[in-house]
Image (cartoon, grey):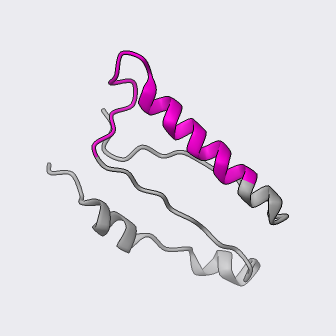
Amino acid sequence: MPEQPLHEFLAAAAIDPAVHALRPDYRALLLAADGLEPGGDAGGAVDELVAAAEAHARALLAELGSSVAVRRRLVGAP
């Protein structure tokens, strides 16, 4: 089965209406990168870059006083 293009994956993303009903202030940020393979590089550089991006997102959100969870979901990963 062919992998879904990133633009289609992002376009299909949505917040469930029940979440909006409960928390109208809820926001989500999706970050997509193409061509990365977790653990595929010998030195773990990809995993380190993704972890650094997650930490940076957490720090920026903390500065805004936002209590959010930053989660990683790998799409199309083996």
Q: Is residue 72 magenta?
A: no
Q: Main secondary structure of the magenta part?
A: helix
Whether 59 is drawn above or below 30: the answer is above
User: Who's the residue at 15% across and 51% down the image?
Assistant: 2
Q: Is residue 49 left or right of residue 38?
A: right
User: Who's the residue at 48% across and 58% down the image?
Assistant: 31
Q: Position of residue 29 (x, y in %)?
A: 56, 65
User: Who's the residue at 42% across and 43% down the image?
Assistant: 74
Q: Position of residue 33 (x, y in %)?
A: 37, 51
Q: Is residue 46 magenta?
A: yes
Query: Which residue is situated farthest in the top direction here?
Result: 42
User: Who's the residue at 75% across and 78% down the image?
Assistant: 22
Looking at the rendering, the stretch of residues picked out in magenta corresponds to: 35-59
Whether 25 is drawn above or below 9: the answer is below
Q: Position of residue 40 (x, y in %)?
A: 33, 24
Q: Is residue 39 left or right of residue 65?
A: left
Q: Nearer the viewer, residue 35 or 23?
A: 35
- Give the number of callouts: 0
